Amino acid sequence: MKIQSVRIFTILVACLSLASAALADPPAEPRVVDFEALEKAPGQRGGSINILMSKPKDIRMMVVYSGARLVAHDQNFSLQPDILRQVDNDGNKAFTLHLRKGHLWSDGQPFTTEDFRYWWEDVAQNEALMQGGPPRQMLVDGAAPEVEIIDSHTIRYSWQAPNPLFLTALAGARPMYIYMPAHYMTQFHEKYADASKLEARIKQQNVQNWASLHKRFGRQYRPENPELPTLQAWMNTTSAPSERFVFKRNPNFHRVDQTGTQLPYLDEVVMNMATSSIIAAKTGTGESDLQGRYIRFDNYAFLKKGAKEGNYKVLLWPSGKGSEMTLLPNLNVADKGWRAAFQDARVRRALSIAIDRAEINETLFLGLARESGNSVLPSSPLYRDEFADAWADYDPDKANGLLDEAGFDKRSGDGIRLLPDGREMEIIVETAGESSQETDILQLIADHWTDVGVKLFVKPTQRDILRGRVASGETMMSTWEGLNRGLATADMDPEELAPVSPVQAQWPDWGRHHESKGKAGEAPTLEEVARLGELYEAWRNAASRDEKETIWLEMLGIFTDQVFTIGIVSGGLQPIVVNNKLRNVPEEGIWSFEPTLYFGQYLPDTFWLEQ
C-alpha cells in the first residue's frame, strides 16, 4: 500500500511539473493575436495532431509552418513585428530592433541582444563557421553594417546606403537567422568552451573539428537537435534518425490570444515519415490531421471519396507559385548551336505560343487554373495583365513564322526543323522526376511542339544531379516551379527576375558571374539580361517603396516579354486535408512557400482541437 502511494505521489509530481512547464508565462510584452481581424474563434488548449512527411530533413517544415519570425508578413503581405516588439526603420539605412521584455527561449533562458551579439561577432564573422563572411543580405556594396547593442533588449544595424533586403530576409520561409541561443551554443565554440571538453565532444560525434560540431548542433532551420532551444511554437523532442518526430508545445512562446491565453493551443504535433508516393493514400484513410505537402490536385477525387470515413474535409487553396510548372531554356548551355537558339527571343517566344495551355488546363486542372506565363499572380499588387499574358496565347502559325524568321526554316524528311549545323531540333527536357503531373504536362507539350517542327524528349534524373548538370552547362532545358514569390510586393527581393545565382537554370553562368563578383562565370551578353541585373542593383539601393515598385514593374515587363522562363498555367488548386475536429484552419488560403509559409501565415498556433 505504501509503495502504491509513493507511485501515485510520484506520478502527481510529474504531472504537476509538466503542467507547470506547459503553462509557463508568456513574455511581459507578448504579441496579442487579433482573432477578430483573422476571423478566428478563441480555442482551448490541448490535443495532438499528426502530419505526414517523406524524409527526415522535412522536419524543417515545422519551422516553416510555425511561422515565428523576427518580423512576419501579415494578411496583406506587409511586414509587421512578430518575435520583435518593434522595429524602427530609418530609410532602409538603419534598423533598430526592440525585443519583448521577459521573452524566454524554450528552455527558460532569457532571449536578449546577447544572442544577436554572439551570432554577429562569433558566428557570422568567424571564417571557420561562415566561409565568405556574413550573408549577402547583411551587406551593402560588400560592406557589413555597424552593429550597436544599445541595451539588453535593443540593437541597431546601420549601413551607409539603403539595405532593402534586411527585413524581408528576416521574414523569409527560410529566414536569415541573426541570432542564436548563446547560452547553449558557446559550449561548442572554441572561444568559449573548455578545450578538453570540446575535444571530447568532437571525438564523440565523430566530426572533423569544432566548427562542424557547432554547425551540427546549431541548426535552427532544420531542428534535428532536440536540445537546441527554440523560439518557434513547437520544439522537436526526437533525435534523428527517426520515423516519428514529436514536436511539443514551446512553454515560452511569445503569442497570446485576446483573452491572454498563451499559444499554441495544440500540445504537440507528431510528424510521421512515409514514402512520398503513399502519402495521399495514408491521408485518405485519416492518418493525417493536416496535410498539404505531398498531395496533389490529381489526388482530389480520391481524397474527397474518403472524407466521411476518414473524418476530414478537403479544402482547395490556389497555389502561390508564378506557374505550376515552368520550362527553363538554358541560355548558357555548352552546346553552341542550342545556346545561340535559346538566346534568340524569337525562339523562346515561339516555343511559348506553340503550347496549347487551354488543353493542358482542361485535361489536368479541370479548367480551374489560369492560362498564363510565369509572372506574379492577380493577388499581388504588382500584377498586370500584360505580364501574365505575354506570349501565352496559343498561336502555332505565329510560332512557325517566328522560328522561320530566326533561321530555322529548313526541315528534315520527318518535318522536324534543323539547326544550322544540320541537327534536328530535338530538345531534351531534364526533370527532377518527382511529379507525375509534370510528366503529363510535358507529354502534352511534346505533341504541341511537334506541330511546329520541334521534338521534345523527357529525361528524368535526381534533383542534385540535375542542378549539377545545369550549372555545368550540360542541360539544354529543365523544368521547375514558377516564381516562388508569385504574391510579391515591392518590398520583396526581385532576385528571381535577375541573374544573381548559379542555381538559376535559365542563366547559371551569368548568375555565377554576379554571385562571385566577376571572379567566375561570364557577364550577360544579352542587353535585356544585363538590364535586369542593373535594375536589381537599383532596387537594392532604393530608399522608397514607390521607387522599388517602379523597378519591380520594369523587371517584370522585361522578364515576361523576353520569355526567359516559359510558364504554363498558374493558380492551380492544392488540396488541403483537415481533420473535422481541427478548428481555425481557414477555408480559403494560398499555398506557397513564400510569402505565406504554406500554413505559417495563417498562424497554426491558433489552430485547436475540439475535444
Image (spheres, grey):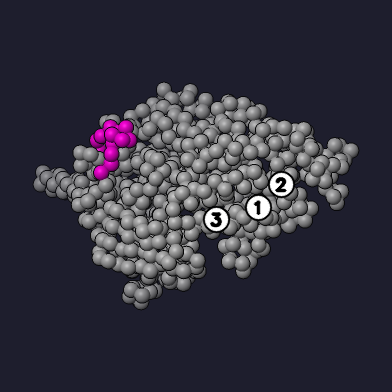
Residue 164 position, x and y percent, is: 44, 56
**Disc 2 and disc 1 in contact, CB within 8 angstroms:** yes
Question: Residue at the bottom extreme?
Answer: 195
Q: Residue at x 77, y 40 (%)?
A: 402
Q: Residues within 10 Å of mark 2 (few under 14, many from 20)?
A: some
Relative to 283, is 397 on the left or the right? Answer: right
Magenta-drawn segment: 32-45
Name the quarter where the N terminus is drawn.
top left
Q: Which residue is mark 3?
A: 536
Q: Residue at x 60, y 50 (%)?
A: 463
Residue 282 position, x and y percent, is: 47, 34
Q: Which residue is mark 2?
A: 345
Element on which disc 2 rests: helix
Name the quarter where the C terminus is drawn.
top left
Residue type indicated by callout 2: Ala
Per the image, is 317 magenta? no
Residue type indicated by callout 1: Glu
